[in-house]
Structure formats: C-alpha cells, structure tokens
Image (cartoon, helix red, strand yellow):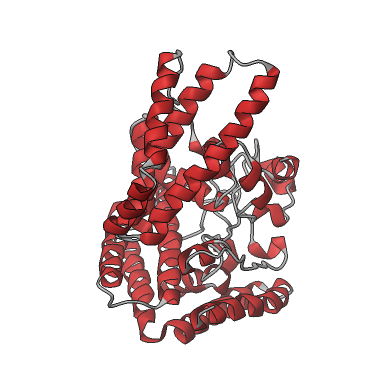
Amino acid sequence: MTPEEWTFLVILLISIPIGFLFKKAGPGLKRWGAAAVGLGLTVFTCGPHTLHSLITVLGTWALIQAQPCSCRSLALLWIFSYTLFFHTLSLLGLQTNMHTYIIQLLVTLKLVSLVRDIPDQHLAQRKEMAAGFSKPPALGLLPDVPSLMETLSYSYCYVGIMTVVLIALLAMGRPPAVRDGVPQPLPGQNGALVSVRAGTGADVGGAWLSCMSVPALIPTPSLEKAAALEYDYETIRNFDCYNGEFCISIREGMRYWNMTVQWWLAQYIYKSVPTRSYVVRSVWTLLLSAYWHGLHPGYYLSFFTMPLCLAAEGCLESALSGRLSPRGRKVWCCVHWFLKMRAYEYMFMSFVLLSVDNTFRYWSSVYFCIHVLALACLGIGLALGGHCPREQKMASQAPSLTPEKFRGE
C-alpha cells in the first residue's frame, strides 16, 4: 500500500469512534462538529489543494443566493465547468493528490443534489406567499435557502467527505429533502457509519470506490408510513459482494455494485433527461458518469462498452427464454455467468489502463473478444426473434431496494 492509501485507511478507522460520539451529540454539535472534522481532514490530506473544493462550494452558494429560483442551470454549469478544469489539471499531471480527487468528486455530487432541491423549495415558498397565508414547510422541504455556513457544513461534513457520496441536510440539524413522498434519513439514525476498505487488488480509484456508501432514499407509499420506517445498515450498504459475484447477468451485477451511486444517477441524471427513450437516457447517464470520473479515454471506452453488452444480453435472453428445457436453462445460466465475469474483466481493464493506446493494445491481444461476442449474441438473438431492452426505469432498481428487499435478496 502507498502512503496515501495508508492515510486513507487510518482516516476510515478513526471515523468509527468519532461516529459513535456524534451519534449521541445534539443537533448543533452534529452540524458544526462534523463539519469541523471534515474540513480538518480535508486540509490535512489536501493541503493547498483544498482550494478546489472550497472554490466549488463558494461559487455554488453565491449562485444559489443570487438566483434561488433559477439557480439550477447556472449552478450545474458552474459545477461541471470547474469539474472540467479540475480534471484537466489531473490529466496534465498538475494535480496528483488522491485525496483531493476523492473529496472533489464527492463534494461535486453533494452540491449537484443541493442545487436540484433549492429551486423546488423556493418555488413552494412563493406559491404559499401568493396564496396569502404562511404555514410551516411540508415534511422534508427545507425551511429556507441555506446560508454560507450551512452550505459549508453540509459540503464538508466528515461523514460524506471520503466515504459517503451523498448525505441529507438533516445531518446539519435541518429537515430532510422529500421528493414524491420519500423522506431522507439522518445518518445518526443509522448508528455510526462504519466503512471498511475492501482489498480489491485494483488501482487506487477502485480501492476508494469500494468503500463509498450513502444513506439511500427509501420509497414509501405515504408520509405516515415513511415516519414509521426504521433504518439500519441496509440503508447505506453500497455493495453486495456475494450477489455481485454470483448473480447470472451483467444487468443484475450492476445492481449490486455501487448501489447508492446508481440511485443518485437514476434520480439526478437519468430522470432529468427530457426524452423517455431508454437508449438516450442511458447514454447520457453513462456519459456524465464517465465525465465525473475524469477525462481519461479509458473511462469512456469502459462505460460505452456496457450498453452493447446489455443489449446483446437482453436480446439473446429474450430469444432463448421460451426455447430451453429446464436442464438447458441451467447450462445456459452457467455459461451466462461465465461470460458476465469475462465482460466485467474486459471493461475493467480500460478503466485501469486509462489511455486509448494501452486499452486497445490489451483488447487487441485478446482479439476484442467481448465486442465480437456481444455483436454475435445480438445478431443471434435478433435472428431468433429476440428484442433489445426497451424503456426500463433505472429508478425502479435503486429506490426499490428497501431494507426488506435488501435482506430478501
């Protein structure tokens, strides 16, 4: 392990006792204490590079204050423009600090989530004023636009600075955001958030990704039932290692990997695409996901191989579903699992090698086998009367993962 990785591991271990202390603390200490710890960790690990995340936060807050009703587009433009600048520095080798990279990406996710909810809150307030009466905000709506200190405490809360992708404003002692009757839990309600770094044998990026988790939104049919829900570890679990390894299909495997990040992508990216086209929505989501990771071509080669594999898998499965005997189905499941694992390895190599030359050198050494096989399966499936996946709501994958369904799976 490199010194940076040792530092990262020590920070994760230290967060365990700190989590138990904050669990019993009052709202004020949770808000400002957690932010102080997070900011301290940021300065300690990033040094002067802390300015990257700080500039992003301050710019976003300024846009929210200037145009709270229409800040969404402006703030997103600012956030993703600075992300481009940050990734350009990394691509040129001018920014090589692993911790800065991690913190910048996670702060970006939290700010995107924040600027999406602010206009909704501001619009609700204006409607109430127009109606000529004032009442407390509905459950889950922010009572007002967050101040500078609240935005900073939310952005630098230690719970979400290196190990959690997205936390609610509840962590700052405020009501959670509720969308479509879905409340967001407070990390303190889940006990101490404990993250254990998995030894993946992969690159540094894969290593820290293996321990990201997020308090996921749990869909409920009504606010009354929402208030009665209890949250446990399943609320923030991000990986299901067993099912991820031994499930049959590529699509299933995706559901068990980075589950909370997939929920975020479904809610904030996939659903925001104006068209209902599954292909367009998926491509746009994958493009932004690759862009969020960086500008290295390997990210894009990896992410854009996935749709081909999914299309081939779905088409061949639909063609064979009614043609196989029970014994043949078992054989097909074994073959399908074997091919799924090879496809993951194939795509992972471009994620690690990063450059076009190195990725194509590896893929050519194995004769572009997964691309060829995917095209062949797609052709066979179409010839047998199969069809490619149509509109399938990604949101139905991640939000449907209630604690009961997690345990059932």
Residue at the spot x=74%, y=45% of the render?
A: 407
Say which quarter of the image contains residue 189. bottom right
x then y, percent, for residue 227:
70, 48
- Decide if residue 35 is on the left or right side of residue 265: right
User: Above or below — where is 181 with respect to 13?
Assistant: above
- Decide if residue 225 is on the left or right side of residue 180: right
x then y, percent, for residue 340:
53, 40
x then y, percent, for residue 324:
61, 16
In the foreground, 162 or 274:
162
Residue at the spot x=28%, y=55% of the render?
A: 356
In the foreground, 120 or 82:
82
Say which quarter of the image contains residue 396. top right
Residue at the spot x=31%, y=54% of the render?
A: 361
Question: In the rendered picture of this protein, how many numbered marks are placed on residues?
Answer: 0
Say which quarter of the image contains residue 249. top right
Image quarter of the C terminus: top right
- Can you see residue 92? yes
In the foreground, 227 or 283:
283
- Can you see residue 180? no
User: Above or below — where is 97 with respect to 381?
Assistant: below
User: Above or below — where is 115 with respect to 308?
Assistant: below
- Decide if residue 130 is on the left or right side of residue 323: left
x then y, percent, for residue 138:
56, 48
User: Above or below — where is 61 with respect to 80?
Assistant: below
Image quarter of the N terminus: bottom right
Residue at the spot x=42%, y=39% of the render?
A: 370
